[in-house]
């Protein structure tokens, strides 16, 4: 019965029209280039978008069509990926090596995708090479709800985005060389907030002449703060002196609203907090992001300033205290478990989020994915999942699948850790379209890792220490586990998620810790819509601007390089159906013929 109800709901939820038509378009012209900056007082090259670091926001509304023309003015191939955006029907807009040929240096390429049935806080970041993000290139994505659908809290007086992340003064190329030489990255040099170094809260710890972020607010107002950990590999604790953080959303799901005095935000994760400016303005206040589970967090602390318009003076006193548990993840794991889905709140659609009763659905596939500390494979330091270290082929998987290029990848990823020597391979999970997959991440490495799945949000149903066993299912949250796309796995512990594979494509599952990602800790899940269910045209035909590479290079036309850099973005509400069809449907090939 529940299943029948669910199917009905899904039928209603997935409207049959091939989208796009009628929905507004938002256009962005972006140029990615190096820019010099000194966030920690040392001059270095960062990746800026339209001269900004962090990059400009992508601020759109549910169901809008987003068109982003990206010019690559770097000296390396570039892609941007849209963290948490699901790219329904257009998996080739995902911007990772398995879905797109990279944009060569000096070329431009236009992403076109619809932010279908999503609301919330996400971010974009460079992704052709994992370590690009260590140089910046990131920015916020805000997907607003349609006016007719209420948000589950009073409309905030302001909307602010904060990027927090660990930072190295070495360039991304030097970091890459270090890993290539088999040397771990070592501790970062600091923590940035919005691309800026720490406020000088202590003369010994912070050198002079560092620019810091100042957040200007009005007393008595309530702001929505969207906080993203865009760093390399460090979990951070976020807090604001004298203010509580009311958690309301994470990665596209409204949470049960709860106050926190601080929140652990792991690499790649996004949270929205409501913060009320309810303190007196005798001083400014510290905004802090400090490293978790490290020996000397003082050296790895980002500090910004919260400044009331009627503030009487600078922030003072010690920084608000971090949880006092350097080598104990118990506080953190309990905090993670306390984050719940608000099942009665509406998400992108008027019906409650919780009308998708994930706990009632029968699991069709189980994957136990185990990681180990990095190890030598053929003399190279590599990270693995189930003993396999991913190697990206020169032909993106999705193009190889569409054009039947043989030998690029194998659909043979093992569903449990294999008792054999680790190897380097291009092995992909064969997902079942509209199957319900249970994935258990088992972390046998020594640091916190976060896993991110493209194309989907998964339900976080369990997290605990030790080895996962069948009995662990008894502890699963089958009711209000939050749906999100990035989840942490503590060392010596496991995290279990459930995901409904209704989005056809080939989707990247990776660790967000950039060093481990670079060393091969990722895989792809292939989800093929069988021919008989092609009624809803998923996916759409390949766009006509597709870049070809690898075995398909001969299909690539020369680019004329006549891109005019304007640095502007605009929103157009009316685009004719004719224009849409020429832009979108000019491709020659269909996925299933
Ligand atoms: C997004 O744009 C809307 C206007 O379209 C504006 O009201 C809102 O403040 C913007 N949000 C952010 C986060 O910039
Ligand atoms: C859940 O959402 C409902 C509906 O918007 C809202 O009224 C309620 O306050 C929310 N509950 C919590 C605990 O956040
Ligand atoms: C600054 O930090 C140093 C090193 O941790 C510490 O010894 C000193 O007490 C701090 N100074 C102040 C004013 O807090
Ligand atoms: C959160 O804390 C604020 C005070 O900062 C309080 O007004 C509010 O009622 C609290 N909300 C919840 C859901 O506990
Ligand atoms: C403002 O708050 C500070 C710290 O809580 C307190 O010491 C001070 O007396 C307060 N000032 C006023 C004017 O309320
Ligand atoms: C992948 O799974 C589909 C069913 O979902 C099956 O028909 C196909 O044979 C599988 N492919 C391989 C290579 O195992
Ligand atoms: C990794 O696995 C080994 C062997 O099962 C075990 O001894 C070790 O404690 C595990 N370490 C972690 C961090 O899980
Ligand atoms: C490159 O940019 C130009 C506009 O400057 C645009 O007409 C062209 O379609 C873009 N190329 C691709 C492949 O998107």
Image (spheres, rainbow, N blue to C red):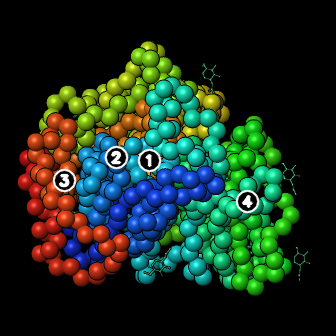
Mark 2, ligand 8, within 8 Å: the answer is no
Task: Decide: is 299 above or below 198.
Answer: above
Question: Residue drawn 32% across and 47% down?
Answer: 77
Assign a secondary structure to mark 4.
Answer: loop
Answer with the quarter of the image where residue 309 lies: bottom right
Q: Is residue 273 above or below residue 108?
A: below
Residue at 58% from the left image edge and 29% from the top image edge: 445
Answer whether labels 1 and 3 touch (C-beta < 8 Å).
no
Do the CB atoms of the residues marked 3 and 4 lie less than 8 Å apart? no
Q: Please give the name of the residue rendered at 57% of the width and 35% of the height, measured from the top-left corner.
A: 185
The nearer-to-camera label among 2 and 4 is 4
Read off the residue under disc 2.
76
Of the image marks 1 and 2, the number of the one nearer the N terminus:
2
> Depth check: 397 or 331 in front?
397
Which badge, 2 or 4, comes first in the chain's sequence?
2
C-alpha span from label 1 to label 4: 28 Å
Comparing 53 with 271, the one in front is: 53
Choose top left, top right, bottom left or bottom right for residue 239.
bottom right
Residue picked out by circle 1: 132
Query: Are the two marked residues, 2 and 3, in contact with CB atoms closer than 8 angstroms?
Result: no
- Residue denoted by label 3: 546
Q: Rounded to the nearest whole Å, what is the CA distance between mark 2 and mark 4?
A: 34 Å
């Amino acid at each position: 019965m529940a299943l029948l109800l669910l199917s009905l709901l899904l039928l209603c939820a997935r409207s049959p029209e091939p989208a796009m038509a009628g929905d507004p378009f938002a256009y962005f012209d972006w140029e990615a280039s190096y820019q010099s900056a000194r966030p920690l007082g040392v001059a270095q090259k960062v990746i800026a978008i339209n001269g900004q670091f962090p990059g400009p926001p992508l601020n759109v509304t549910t169901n809008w069509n987003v068109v982003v023309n990206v010019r690559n003015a770097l000296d390396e191939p570039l892609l941007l990926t849209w963290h948490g955006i699901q790219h329904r029907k257009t998996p080739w807009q995902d911007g990772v090596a398995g879905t797109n040929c990279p944009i060569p240096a000096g070329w431009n390429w236009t992403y076109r995708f619809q932010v279908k049935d999503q609301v919330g806080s996400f971010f974009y970041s460079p992704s052709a090479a994992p370590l690009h993000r260590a140089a910046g290139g990131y920015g916020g994505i805000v997907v607003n709800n349609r006016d007719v659908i209420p948000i589950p809290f009073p409309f905030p007086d302001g909307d602010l985005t904060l990027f927090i992340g660990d930072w190295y003064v070495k360039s991304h190329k030097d970091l890459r060389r270090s890993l290539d030489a088999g040397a771990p990255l070592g501790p970062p040099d600091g923590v940035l907030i919005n691309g800026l170094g720490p406020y000088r809260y202590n003369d010994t710890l912070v050198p002079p002449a560092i620019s810091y972020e100042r957040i200007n607010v009005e007393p008595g107002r309530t702001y929505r703060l969207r906080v993203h950990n865009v760093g390399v590999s460090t979990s951070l604790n976020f807090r604001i002196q004298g203010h509580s953080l009311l958690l309301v959303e994470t990665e596209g799901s409204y949470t049960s609203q709860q106050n926190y005095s601080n929140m652990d935000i792991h690499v790649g994760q996004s949270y929205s907090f409501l913060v009320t400016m309810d303190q007196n303005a005798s001083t400014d206040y510290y905004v802090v992001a400090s490293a978790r589970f490290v020996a000397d967090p003082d050296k790895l602390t980002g500090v910004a300033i919260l400044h009331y318009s009627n503030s009487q003076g600078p922030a003072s006193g010690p920084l608000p205290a971090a949880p006092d548990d350097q080598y104990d993840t118990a506080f953190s794991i309990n905090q993670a478990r306390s984050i719940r889905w608000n099942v009665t709140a509406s998400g992108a659609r008027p019906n409650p989020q919780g009308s998708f009763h994930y706990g009632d659905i029968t699991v069709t596939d189980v994957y136990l994915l185990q990681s180990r500390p990095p190890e030598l494979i053929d003399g190279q330091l590599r990270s693995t999942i189930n003993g396999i270290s991913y190697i990206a082929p020169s032909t993106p998987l999705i193009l190889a699948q569409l054009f039947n290029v043989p030998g690029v990848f194998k659909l043979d990823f093992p569903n449990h850790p294999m008792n054999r020597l680790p190897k380097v391979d291009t092995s992909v999970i064969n997902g079942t379209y509209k199957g319900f997959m249970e994935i258990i991440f088992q972390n046998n490495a020594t640091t916190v890792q976060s896993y991110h799945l493209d194309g989907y949000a998964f339900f976080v149903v369990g997290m605990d220490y030790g080895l996962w066993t069948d009995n662990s299912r008894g502890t699963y949250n089958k009711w209000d586990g939050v749906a999100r796309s990035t989840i942490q796995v503590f060392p010596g512990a496991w995290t279990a998620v459930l995901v409904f594979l209704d989005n056809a494509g080939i989707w990247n599952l990776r660790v967000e810790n950039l060093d481990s990602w670079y060393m091969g800790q990722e895989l792809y899940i292939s989800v093929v819509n069988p021919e008989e269910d092609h009624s809803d045209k998923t996916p759409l035909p390949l766009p006509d601007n597709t870049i070809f590479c690898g075995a398909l290079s001969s299909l690539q036309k020369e680019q004329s390089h006549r891109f005019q850099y304007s640095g502007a973005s605009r929103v157009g509400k009316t685009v004719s159906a004719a224009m849409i069809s020429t832009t979108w449907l000019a491709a020659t090939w269909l996925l299933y013929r």
